Amino acid sequence: MNDRFLRACRREPVDATPVWFMRQAGRYMAEYLEIRAKYSMLEVCRTPELATQVTLQPLRFGVDAAILFADILLPLEPMGAPFDFAKGEGPVVHEPIRTSADIDKLRLIDPEESLGYCLEAIRMLRRELKVPLIGFAGAPFTLASYLIEGGKSAHFTATKRLMYAEPEAWHRLMGKLAEVVRRFLRAQVAAGAQALQVFDSWVGQLGPDDYTRFIAPHMRAILSDVQSTGVPVIHFGTGTSTLLELMAQAGGTVIGVDWRDRLGEAWGRVGYDKAVQGNLDPTVLFAPRSVIQEQARAVLLQAATRPGHIFNLGHGILPGTPVEEVEALVDFVHTETSGPHSRVGSSPRGSSGPKD
Ligand code: CP3
């Protein structure tokens, strides 16, 4: 069992920096596209054998963790808001939630009953995997934005209108989403997930005061509960430069950092009592290999051999990313951080980094 990833989550010394990628299974891989030629995205998610097969595909790159193949939007359908992935447009929620009455109708689901296919995929994966399995869910704000806007959004106008104009309704919606997310994450741990990531991908749309008032209480409710199961929880967002301290206070064992921040500075703000994950710009993978390696080394130097860094991109792998660069990057991070000739980190760690 390769437990580098779990050790790094706990800020223990590791033999090499662990690496995995958000969206590591997906359209940039030929094997994935082959399956998608036969089945829709939702069919893959809802068929445990297919979800398992796709989850395993990127492991040939040598990544140190697997992430369940699923989507953050899956709980919305059983809650009463069916959606589809429209070609070229991304997710479309058929009847967006706009009123207080719409919010009242949303159901608090039992994950074993309505998302059992994800839990079954987790059980199947645990029988095969030699690396830890990460389960995940979307955070209430990011889920609410899809529910309210009906899909992806540029300005989140309808979402913020509800938040500012009807704060009571907003908190009711966030409370329901937080409860569903909490139950789903707990069910994933019970099924065998060894770590969790909460994706608050669009929360960087908010400033710190709105985060404190409209988001933080709901994140705290989720994170304190699921962290009490003992599995590490990665709290991730993008565009979060002004929110990192608040996110860390809201909870999480590991804080995800995107590429707009220097990882070392971000870590200082998060606090060294937490691990960090990140933060290469996903578009760097389209650059020549020498540039990828230079930028990856810069990320590793920011982590400065301090225990508790998980190498990742600042957001998910993009479609069209060259597969051979993904594989070369995994190898580079491992080689660069292991062995007696390591330039940026080696075991035992912690002596040459910046002081706390
Ligand atoms: O990381 C992984 O490998 C696990 C699988 C995963 C997917 N989505 C698969 C997927 C995870 C963790 C997600 C999370 C997710 N889904 C987020 C948060 C993370 C992020 O990237 O910010 C969000 C916002 C969604 C909602 C969603 N689902 C979007 C915006 C899209 C993209 C639509 C498009 O066409 O680009 C999806 C679809 C989706 N989810 C795909 C995959 C592989 C593409 C489906 C396909 O066409 O094959």
Image (cartoon, rainbow, N blue to C red):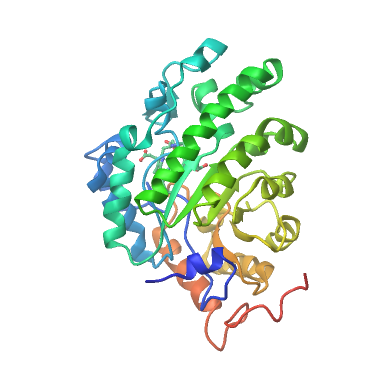
| Whole-percent x, y for residue 331 in the image | 45, 72
Q: Nearer the viewer, residue 208 or 37?
A: 208
Q: Is residue 99 visible?
A: no
Quadrant in which residue 35 is drawn: top left
Q: Residue at x 34, y 67 (%)?
A: 130
Q: Is residue 64 visible?
A: yes
User: Quadrant of the image for the C terminus?
Assistant: bottom right
For this view, does 39 lie left or right of residue 273?
left
Q: Is residue 325 above or below residue 134?
A: below
Q: Residue at x 37, y 71 (%)?
A: 1
For this view, does 17 lie left or right of residue 213?
left
For this view, does 41 lie left or right of residue 202?
left
The image quadrant where one finds ligand 1 is top left
Q: Is residue 329 above or below residue 155?
A: below
| Whole-percent x, y for residue 115 in the image | 34, 36
| Whole-percent x, y for residue 259 in the image | 64, 53
Q: Residue at x 54, y 21 (%)?
A: 148
Q: How many marks?
A: 0
Q: Is residue 9 above or below residue 249?
A: below
| Whole-percent x, y for residue 25 in the image | 38, 51
